[in-house]
Image (spheres, grey):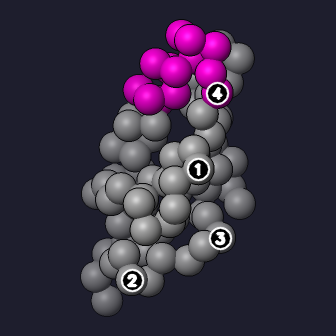
């Protein structure tokens, strides 16, 4: 079995539009960049991270839920 990859699904994107990252840190960094950019304009962004060895094995239910905290940090919650 191949190692799990991190699939980041932002906003209202469909699961098949989730972007693949090799590490959790890379996925969080991508989310943080997008969320902070939108926050400058008063917009909120949420995201989910799905762990799976390949895209065809993605489950609808996420492993992690991401949001931007009040001071700009990334809030990570297990789903």
Residue name at image x 70 percent, y 17 percent: 70
Give the secondary structure at mark 1: loop
Q: Residues within 10 Å of mark 3 (few under 14, many from 20)?
A: few
Q: CA distance from mark 4 to mark 3?
A: 21 Å
Depth check, mark 1 against mark 3: the one in front is 1
Quadrant where the C terminus is found in the figure: bottom right
List the residue tagged with mark 3: 61
Tell me if I can see residue 25 in this picture. no
List the residue tagged with mark 4: 44
Residue 6 location (% of width, % of height):
40, 60
Residue 30 location (% of width, % of height):
38, 37
Residue name at image x 41 percent, y 60 percent: 17
In the picture, the disc for residue 12 is 1
Q: Nearer the viewer, residue 41 or 32?
A: 41
Magenta-highlighted stretch: main secondary structure? helix
Task: Please state the extent of the stretch shown in magenta in the rendering.
Answer: 32-44
In the picture, the disc for residue 56 is 2
Quadrant in which residue 78 is drawn: bottom right
Give the secondary structure at mark 2: helix
Depth check, mark 2 against mark 1: the one in front is 1
Residue name at image x 44 percent, y 29 percent: 34
Labels 4 & 3 near each other (Cβ < 8 A): no
Q: Residues within 10 Å of mark 4 (few under 14, many from 20)?
A: some
Give the secondary structure at mark 4: loop
Residue name at image x 39 percent, y 35 percent: 29
Residue 40 position (above or below residue 24): above
């Amino acid at each position: 079995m191949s190692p799990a990859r991190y699939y980041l699904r932002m906003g209202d994107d469909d699961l098949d539009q989730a972007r693949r990252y090799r590490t959790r840190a890379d996925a969080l960094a991508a989310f943080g960049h997008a969320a902070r950019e939108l926050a400058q304009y008063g917009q909120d962004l949420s995201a989910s991270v799905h762990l799976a060895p390949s895209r065809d094995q993605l489950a609808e239910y996420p492993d992690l839920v991401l949001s931007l905290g009040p001071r700009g940090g990334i809030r990570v919650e297990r789903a």
